[in-house]
Image: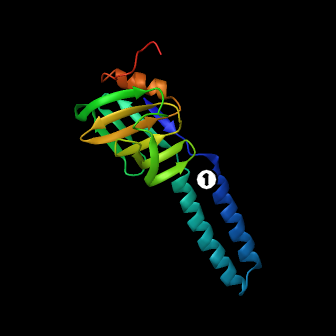
Amino acid sequence: MSFSLNPPGIILIIGLGALLLLLVSALRGKGNRTTRYVRLGIGAVAIGGLLIFAYRPSYIRVDSSGISSNSGGSISIPWNKVSEAAYLPSLADSPYRPTSKVAGVALGAYRIGTFRTAGKGDARVLSQTTGGALIVQADGKTYEFAPAELQKMVAEVAKHRSVSGWSPAR
């Protein structure tokens, strides 16, 4: 089963705003027409490439082989490497609460990358919600998953591994 993490719309708005600024500056800028059009073309391709990279959704896949993700620096966690899986209904007072970004993107609840946590060192975070999370320990690394369909993801993981803090009645 796949779970998507869709980037916030602000990324698209900022990219389109940058493209509009580029267009205005190229059309009103100094230099001959050819130079301005070349600058416009190069800038449009650069901004377009950045938007394609930044605005694509990330996916978390849970299946019989383990948990995987296509997010930057893709993740692949086979079930035999998982030492612990825990459902936390709230990260507010948890030692797993992300406190600062090491590498990645953080826009509101949308977080993808490596983050320092309140008390457990660094964790690889793939989050679209601020409420709870599924914490997975594997090969000495910590992973925090919080897609919009967190309950469904935890139920899917519970089919393959025991998840502490989770009861199927949720």
Q: Secondary structure at mark 1?
A: helix
Q: Which residue is mark 1?
A: 11
130 relative to 133 in the view: left or right: right
Relative image position of residue 134 (x, y in whole percent): 41, 31
Quarter of the image for residue 162 reads top left
Nearer to us in this view, 122 or 57 = 122
- Return the x and y of residue 105 as percentages of the image width and height: 50, 52
As drawn, which residue projects farthest toward the bottom? 31
Residue 110: x percent and y percent?
A: 54, 44
Please indicate whether residue 41 sits to the left or right of residue 157 in the image: right
Q: Quadrant of the N terminus?
A: top left
* Residue 148 against residue 142 in the figure, above or below: above
Q: Give the residue at the far top of this rendering.
A: 169
Mark 1: which amino acid?
Answer: Ile
Which residue sits at x=40%, y=26%?
87
Q: Is residue 128 left or right of residue 86?
A: right
Is 41 or 169 nearer to us in this picture?
A: 169
Q: Residue at x 54, y 60 (%)?
A: 50
Quadrant of the image occupied by residue 31? bottom right
Q: Nearer the viewer, residue 130 or 69?
A: 130
**Crowdedness near tag 1: few (<14), some (14–19) or many (≥20) residues, C-alpha within 10 Å:** some
